[in-house]
Amino acid sequence: MDVGNQMIGTVGEKKFLDKVFDILGGNDKNFLNGLNQDSSILKINHNTLLATNIDKAQTPIILSDDDLNTYKAWGYLSVTSSLSDILVVGAKGLSFLISITVPANIQTQKVLNIIEGAQEACKYYGISFLGGDTKKGNEISVVGTANGIITGSDYLSRNSSHPSDLIVCTGQFGQFATSYYKILKSLELELHETNYVSYPRFAIDQCEVVNSNLSLFSASMDNSDGLSNILSKMFIENNLGFEIYLDSIPFSEKSRELSKSHNIPLENFAFYVGDWNSIFTISEENFKILGKRVENHELKVIGKVKKSSNIKEFHKNTKRYSCSLRFENDSFISSTGDTNYLLNNILTTASVLI
């Protein structure tokens, strides 16, 4: 198929990127990890690697013209979404730049607040804010570029897991989905829930544990696009399968409360976007070594990598469910022949939660 003659919306992201990769190739020996990654790794010298990322920030759900301070969330989100991809490959955050496109009739204070939010986020993460660029366009667009340094030669990519690796996570699941649901239903948010969506912050403490023991881990990805995206990008696209232990996923306290009070299956919260945590893979042996090196590291085992992409399973209690690659609501089949709410209520799109 000649994708060059078709509209990009028709071609789709994956086929378009495949074409990009064909054009650009991989002839730069200092570009270590290839194009199909969330962060690019450049070799500076034998003991220093540069990690860099560029990312367009989504419009914050908290945004309101009745409170221009909410525009700070856009700048904050831009830093977090770019820096998270830097941290999970093993880098220490170094700097950030922002590029803002805005219409000519936008109120100046909104733009200033976006920039101020980015500056505040950089201060929180302990990285340098290096300014950026502002241009006129038809709508607001906020793009961030983060840079980080890796000392040594070890780094992580999303396509380097091994069969039998453990799948471990940092942070909790469901915090963003809980706040978003409450906003949509006009329910009152508690202060920490408002702060979570106003000042999105990546779970950096546990990432620092990983980065201090980088050679023990095999692969990584930030989980801001949801667990379905992780399972596809890290495993299925690399001809690997997975088992996910739904009972082991660390859900936030508020998502558990909302699950009970509004009859939303708890598993739904694991497959939603917006959680600023990350997923790593590590061998069982290395996980034991990590436990001896770092007490109470809080990395949770939520699954295992399988050698065949035909194995795509979710475990809950004593039941086991297989699923299709698309993770559609009607794609879950109990291997025991039993059915329950899991069949029709695993979250794969926003409409299920809403």
Image: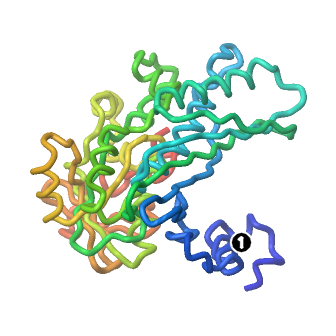
Quadrant in the rendering for residue 261: top left
Residue at image mark 1:
11
What residue is at 48 percent from the left and 59 percent from the top? 49
x then y, percent, for residue 268: 37, 46
Q: Camera-side residue: 324 or 308? A: 308
Quadrant in the rendering for residue 81: top right
Quadrant in the rendering for residue 69: top right
Q: In the drawing, does residue 115 fall left or right of residue 190?
A: right
- Which three-letter amino acid code belongs to the residue tagged 1? Val
Q: In the drawing, does residue 300 fall left or right of residue 240?
A: left
Q: Is residue 119 visible?
A: yes
x then y, percent, for residue 167: 27, 59
What residue is at 33 percent from the left and 35 percent from the top? 263
Furthest residue toward right? 104
Q: How is the image coloured?
A: rainbow
Q: In the drawing, does residue 77 fall left or right of residue 275?
A: right
x then y, percent, for residue 97: 65, 40
Furthest residue toward bottom? 1
Q: Camera-side residue: 316 or 15? A: 15
Q: Camera-side residue: 228 or 223? A: 223
> Number of marks in the image?
1
SS at badge 1: helix
Badge 1: how crowded within 10 Å, few (<14), some, or many (20+)? some
**Quadrant of the rendering where the N terminus is positioned:** bottom right
Q: In the drawing, does residue 150 fall left or right of residue 342?
A: right
What residue is at 83 percent from the left and 77 percent from the top? 5
What residue is at 16 percent from the left and 53 percent from the top? 290
x then y, percent, for residue 14: 61, 70
Q: Camera-side residue: 326 or 123? A: 123
Q: Is residue 181 visible?
A: no
